[in-house]
């Protein structure tokens, strides 16, 4: 078992945290003391079913969620995810699967992603993914937001000012078996981006939980605060969490067609994402704050369009300098206020629908759609797909999800009911909030 495996320091091990991510995209855990773990290995901790009906604002059950005070769900550690926490070595973390009456619970977000992976497998496809996080480092102050730097994109001064904490984050990620790839200070004050290697879909979502946990905890160790909140400063770049995807068959990457373009499978998958994107956004950009980030000219995916190396399109297909190219694509209309299991699972179901119906994503877009009027965009789009501005607030995305039969069915009746109830409660509570009030409420949640 992982608590016994590594002995990096002379640390008295204390707790195993069994972690889950709820419908408000909060990462939570219940911990069990190691002294009693051996006798509770199969069922170490439980949560109330109502936990999946809690909004981001407070601990309480939202109306019409289908969940209430009665009902217990067990969190069963997936031991393959168990890690000693490098930033808290007396604790370990394992991601929990939600079990009720000995079966996977229909509302478990991780089970939803497993169902999406199984559906992909059924279609002969394996999905690899990576969440590419941007986050803000802030000085720890109760009532003021003071970024750790005021530097510009990729500033070496930004690197020097933040080197110690960035190195510590990289160390902690590596210690949890993630492959750290690239790092740079991003555009906004105190904003940084660290990318990690792609993985099989379930592991990519588990990695996203570990990544968010690690950045936040290492910041605390350094006397700082970290936040993944999509938009902290109105006029500066927001924190995206682009979702990188590649499609595989029999161990071979089939995203490209071998001649520098996307394969027909990848094109149909992208068409499915674009077709469902207004509804998907209730899962990939699920916070009221998310929509402050998604604006033209901020490279945040404000338009339902795809393009090669186009940073204003919702789906960007990055090209590689040498073949094979392309090898993957990214959904920019995605942020870290999303529950990674729900977001990735829903994106997979949408993509598979594109394949099943052989949808056409239209031509690649090689302009900045934000520079054109709606009429001009209609003209430039083609019969297969118009270039459209995506939902501009959570309310609109909720409407789209409420009418998207494919995604509702994929989620299943119980999960879609609880999920929509939580989103609606958040929208009602926060739709008229000023940015400052919203940021104060959400900064430490995400
Ligand atoms: N910060 C941008 C966003 O909101 C992304 C910038 C980039 O392309 O890395 O998604
Ligand atoms: Mg970036």
Image: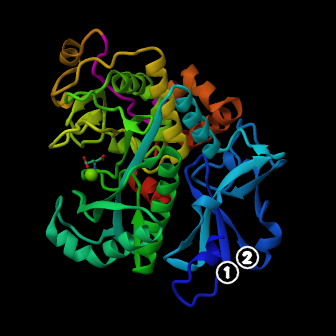
In the rendered structure, does residue 389 fall within the stretch colored magenta? yes
Q: Which residues are magenta?
A: 384-399
In this rendering, is residue 182 above or below 372?
Answer: below
Q: Is mark 1 within 8 Å of ligand 2?
A: no
Residue 277 at x, y percent in the picture: 42, 28
Residue 406 at x, y percent in the picture: 56, 22
Q: Answer with mark 2 or mark 1, whichever residue precedes in sequence.
A: 1
Label 2 secondary element: strand
Q: Nearer the viewer, residue 23 or 12?
A: 12
In the rendered structure, does residue 40 fall within the stretch colored magenta? no
Q: In the picture, which quadrant includes the N terminus?
A: bottom right
Of all residues shown, which one is farthest toward the bottom? 10
- Write the residue at 45% across / 65% down: 177
Compared across the picture, whether 183 is left or right of 367 comes to right
Residue 200 at x, y percent in the picture: 47, 46
- Write the residue at 33% across / 32% down: 255
The reply to whether callout 2 and callout 1 are in contact (CB within 8 Å) is yes
Residue 32 at x, y percent in the picture: 73, 71
Q: Can residue 395 be seen in the rendering of this structure?
A: no
Which label was assigned to residue 33? 2
- Write the residue at 29% across / 38% down: 327
Compared across the picture, whether 255 is left or right of 212 comes to left
Compared across the picture, whether 76 is left or right of 120 comes to right
Dot 1: few (<14), some (14–19), or many (≥20) neighbours within 10 Å? some
Of all residues shown, which one is farthest toward the front? 250
């Amino acid at each position: 078992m992982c608590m016994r495996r590594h002995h990096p320091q002379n640390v008295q091990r204390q707790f195993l945290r069994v972690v889950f991510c709820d419908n408000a995209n909060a990462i939570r855990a219940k911990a069990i003391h190691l002294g009693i773990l051996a006798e509770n290995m199969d069922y170490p901790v439980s949560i109330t079913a109502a936990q999946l009906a809690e909004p981001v604002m407070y601990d309480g059950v939202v109306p019409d969620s289908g969940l209430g005070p009665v009902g217990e769900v067990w969190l069963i550690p997936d031991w393959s995810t168990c890690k000693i926490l490098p930033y808290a070595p007396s604790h370990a973390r394992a991601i929990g699967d939600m079990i009720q009456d000995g079966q996977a619970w229909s509302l478990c977000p991780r089970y939803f992603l497993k169902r999406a992976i199984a559906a992909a497998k059924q279609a002969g496809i394996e999905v690899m993914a990576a969440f590419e996080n941007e986050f803000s480092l802030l000085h720890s102050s109760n009532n003021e937001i003071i970024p750790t730097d005021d530097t510009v994109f990729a500033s070496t001064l930004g690197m020097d000012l933040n080197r110690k904490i960035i190195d510590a984050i990289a160390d902690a990620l590596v210690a949890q078996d993630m492959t750290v790839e690239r790092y740079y200070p991003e555009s906004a004050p105190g904003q940084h981006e660290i990318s990690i290697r792609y993985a099989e879909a379930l592991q990519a979502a588990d990695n996203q939980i570990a990544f968010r946990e690690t950045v936040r905890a290492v910041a605390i160790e350094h006397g700082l605060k970290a936040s993944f909140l999509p938009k902290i400063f109105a006029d500066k770049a927001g924190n995206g969490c682009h979702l990188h995807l590649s499609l595989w068959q029999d161990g071979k990457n089939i995203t490209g067609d071998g001649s520098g373009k996307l394969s027909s499978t990848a094109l149909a998958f992208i068409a499915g994402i674009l077709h469902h994107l207004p509804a998907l956004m209730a899962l990939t950009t699920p916070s009221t704050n998310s929509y402050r980030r998604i604006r033209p000219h901020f490279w945040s995916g404000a338009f339902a369009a795809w393009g090669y190396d186009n940073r204003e399109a919702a789906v960007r297909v990055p090209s590689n300098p040498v073949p094979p190219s392309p090898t993957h694509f990214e959904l920019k209309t995605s942020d870290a206020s999303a529950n990674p299991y729900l977001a990735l699972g829903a994106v997979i179901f949408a993509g598979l629908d594109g394949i099943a119906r052989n949808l056409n994503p239209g031509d690649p877009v090689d302009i900045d759609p934000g520079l054109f009027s709606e009429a001009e965009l209609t003209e430039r789009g083609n019969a297969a797909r118009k270039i459209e501005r995506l939902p501009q607030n959570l309310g609109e995305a909720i409407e789209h999800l409420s009418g998207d039969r494919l995604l509702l069915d994929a989620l299943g009746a119980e999960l879609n009911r609880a999920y929509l109830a939580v989103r609606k409660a958040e929208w009602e509570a926060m739709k008229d909030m000023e940015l400052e009030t919203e940021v104060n409420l959400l900064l430490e949640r995400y």
